[in-house]
Amino acid sequence: MINMDYSKSVTIDTLGQEWVASPMSGVWRKPLAREDAERGHATSIVKYDAGASFSAHGHPKGEEILVLQGVFSDETGDYPAGTYFRNPEGFSHAPFSKEGCTILVKLHQFQAEDSAHICIDTRKALVQQPGVCKHLQLHQFANEQVEMFRCIADAELDFSYAVDGLEIYVISGSLSDEGGVYYAGYWTRMYSGKGKSYKVSAGSLIWVKSNHLSLS
């Protein structure tokens, strides 16, 4: 078991982690939170070497992916960096990557009645958003939210609404609080973001999930 006590805050510099081999040749992982070796709740950074593939499989309680680098593919299409998608329980695919890719993956964490199949090109969608700190809502079910923020100037983000969990992955740039500075590649999770705000540097892109830990 890895980082499965939600009452404890955890921060990981994923760029400093070592890659761990998966059961499939050419597919590597950096576990961030894991219930069991090959099943159950898991949050990971996953890397596909060029030409690597995974056999066809489904995902009980769903699969959530953000493509960080390269192009992630399956029989439904090719998904470049910036693509966010959700594959609900019952969906099966055989993923691969021709050129190689790196993805943020969350498994076995959908709410029981959340059956939305979502695919969003966040790079295109963010361009269309107004303001200095562009906000894109990727998904919402009950109180659970998934969002992205791109700040083109220094800004402050208030996450006080995240009373039942706050999880952040810094894609580029940095954000900071009283505890320090979190650069690209940092993943952090806390039981509650109540009263929590971060200073965000110009050029930052961050992925945020909130109000989900009490439901996991």
Image: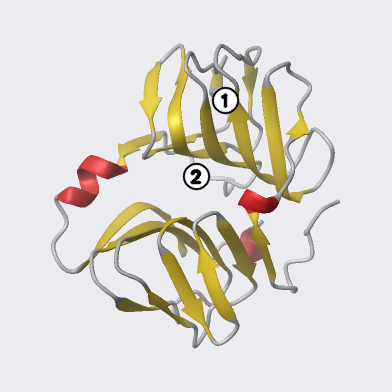
Q: Is residue 52 above or below residue 118?
A: above
Horizontal side of 80 relative to 45 (left or right) equals left
Judge by depth and name the residue closer to the eye, 184 or 88. Answer: 184
**16 in relation to 179, above or below:** above
Residue 22 coordinates in the image, percent (x, y): 76, 27
Which structural element holds mark 2?
A: loop
Residue that appears at 44% across and 77% down: 159
Image coords of residue 102 (percent x, y)? 53, 34
What residue did someone put label 2 on?
114
Looking at this view, name the residue that lies furthest to the front.
16
Rounded to the nearest angstrom, the CA distance separating label 2 from label 1 is 12 Å
| Residue for point 13% across, 62% down | 130
Please tell me which residue is depicted at 23% across the width and 51% down the height of the picture. 126
Please name the residue that numbered disc 1 is placed on: 90
**What amino acid is at disc 1?**
Gly
**Residue density around tag 2, few if under 14, some if 14–19, many if 20 or more, within 10 Å:** some
2 horizontally vs 52: left or right: right
Task: Name the N-terminal-most of marks 2 and 1.
Answer: 1
